Image (cartoon, rainbow, N blue to C red):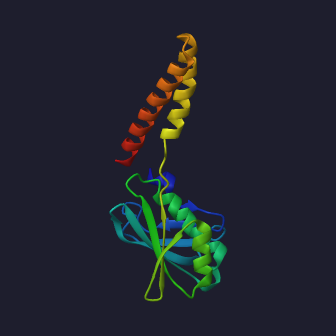
Amino acid sequence: MAEELFPLVTRHFKIQPSDEKSIWDQEWNISLVDNDSLSVGTLNFENGIFNGEVKINAELDPEYDKTNYVEELFYSMARFVFMFKDIREISTVCRHENEHRVRGLEKAGYVHRQFKDGDDYYSMKKQKTSWTGFYIFIGMVAGFIIGLTISNLWMGTIGGVLIGAVLGYLMDKKEEK
């Protein structure tokens, strides 16, 4: 599986872990797509996975520490870590004065969580899937059909919506685990 995942390729960067067997503990190399021998930065996960959260730290060369590059890098890393089922949040820290990093993180979808000791703390949470609305809609359509066949449209629709709501609730509960 690791052969298919690495390197992570974005528009400008190739992101490759130094050891593909222990990706959470090793330093990653950030190089350019058109010249992968030129390293423009490093990336690492601090403390691995803890309570469904990973903390990422990236250092880029000054000429690549610009808003568009930061957005591209952090967005691609969020996409990568959210492929793992047990990770629900990715976070990072940056200096408040680093406007390019702050804007890049915000454009990538990270949300400012707190300001402490001159550092801004940003994170992105994995979106949860909501099945309840989908199943209520399916239940309503099925209820119309059942209601037409039993010649009682109201009973069929109400029954379909209730069954759909129960199925949606159960699916949402299953996904939280």
Q: Residue at x 56, y 63 (%)?
A: 76
Q: Give how far across and how far down residue 89 sits, in percent.
A: 43, 62
Q: Nearer the viewer, residue 122 or 115?
A: 115
- Residue sticking out furthest to the top: 150
Q: Give how far across and how far down residue 88 sits, in percent.
A: 42, 58
Q: Residue at x 63, y 79 (%)?
A: 64
Q: Nearer the viewer, residue 139 or 174?
A: 139
Q: Is residue 177 left or right of residue 131?
A: left
Q: Give how far across and how far down residue 34 sits, in percent.
A: 67, 68
Q: Is residue 164 left or right of residue 173?
A: right
Q: Is residue 62 above or below residue 36?
A: below
Q: Residue at x 61, y 83 (%)?
A: 99
Q: Is residue 45 left or right of residue 72?
A: left
Q: Number of numbered discs present?
A: 0
Q: Give how far across and how far down residue 31 sits, in percent.
A: 58, 72
Q: Is residue 52 above or below residue 169?
A: below
Task: Report if residue 32 is visible in the image.
Answer: no
Residue 53, picture quadrant: bottom left
Residue 30, picture quadrant: bottom right
Task: Report if residue 21 is visible in the image.
Answer: yes
Q: Is residue 172 above or below residue 3?
A: above
Q: Residue at x 50, y 34 (%)?
A: 135
